[in-house]
Image (cartoon, helix red, strand yellow):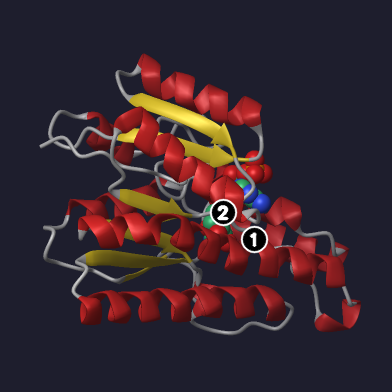
Amino acid sequence: MVRFQFINYFYKVKTGIVSLFSDKTNKVRSNLNKRLLNKEQGAKLVLGARREDKLKAIADNIKTKGGEAVYRVTDVVKPEDNIALVELAKSTFGKVDAIFLNAGLMPNSPLSALETDNWNAMVDVNIKGVLNGIVAVLPTFEAQKSGHIISTSSVAGLKVYPGCAVYCGTKWAVKAIMEALRMESAQAGTNIRTATIYPAAVQSELVASITDEATSTAYRQLYDAYEIPAERVANVVAFALAQPDDTNVSEFTLGPTTQPW
Ligand SMILES: NC(=O)c1ccc[n+]([C@@H]2O[C@H](COP(=O)([O-])OP(=O)(O)OC[C@H]3O[C@@H](n4cnc5c(N)ncnc54)[C@H](OP(=O)(O)O)[C@@H]3O)[C@@H](O)[C@H]2O)c1
């Protein structure tokens, strides 16, 4: 069965449909790409992020491999952008089956650094971005009595680390929002599935958003020591999507076998 998938897809992230993209070594291909492109699980993708050149390159790459993808420049902080992305999915493919809320920032620093602009940016993207994605798709999923909402929290949404106060807070918020969404959907009988992913160190551009010098150096060392390719997260997304419609696997924690925290 070919399912339409609406993926709020953020190319760098590699979390998710890292798709047809490679990671920063340009060698790793996501298994998910293959799974989404095969006849049984072929997906039609709608991609959203802020950088149009990246979106276009990704969509072109998907198409050259036989997949279908459209994109729209999207700022998840703007509710209207999220709604427009869902509308684009409907007008292009006729249906929306899943949304992957993956955008996130991690400009960490100690609270004493008073990086209030970064605190606000994390709250806006990591929390409000997820809420904006949910509100954009929930009425559709409720009406059709099906749908899959997947989001990316973090191991920082399960534990707290010094120097990570606001990021941890945003990722704990994602955990809470997603669990309430799962419970409310079950109570209401809407058959909406949810999945929250809690990755540890995964290759991406995330560390580049850290402006505090000491924090940046420490994270770079940590990621250089431990990070695993983003396809590992993509595999989890593929697993969640592949479950039978009556089965919800709601939480996934993953990370390098070598990373102790
Ligand atoms: N990498 C890790 O070790 C790790 C661990 C735990 C959790 N995570 C989480 O995984 C998710 C993906 O991050 P990543 O590690 O892949 O980092 P990344 O390479 O920096 O990717 C972040 C993505 O989010 C998009 N984005 C940022 N702000 C946005 C906005 N306002 N509107 C739309 N898109 C926006 C970016 O695209 P544009 O800049 O073009 O908009 C980019 O594609 C995040 O939620 C992050 O917190 C990552």
Task: Name the mark on residue 52.
Answer: none
In this rendering, would 104 be left or right of 238?
Answer: right
Quarter of image, res 214: bottom right
Instruction: Assign the N terminus to one quadrant of the image.
Output: top left
Asked if labels 2 and 1 touch by Cβ distance under 8 angstroms, the answer is yes
Disc nearer the start of the sequence (1/2): 2
Given residues 133 and 154, the one toward you in this image is 133
Q: Residues within 10 Å of mark 1 (few under 14, many from 20)?
A: many
> Where does label 1 land, which residue?
125
Q: Is residue 124 above or below residue 62?
A: below
Looking at the picture, how far across and down is residue 233, in whole percent? 39, 53
Q: Amino acid at mark 2?
A: Ala
Looking at the picture, how far across and down is residue 80, in whole percent? 59, 49
In this rendering, would 142 be left or right of 136?
Answer: left
**Secondary structure beneath label 2:** loop
Given residues 162 and 17, the one toward you in this image is 17
Label 1 CB less than 8 angstroms from ligand 1 = yes
Looking at the picture, how far across and down is residue 259, in whole percent? 49, 69
> Where does label 2 land, which residue?
103
Quarter of image, res 220: bottom right
Q: Is residue 246 above or below residue 205?
A: below
Given residues 160 and 118, the one toward you in this image is 118
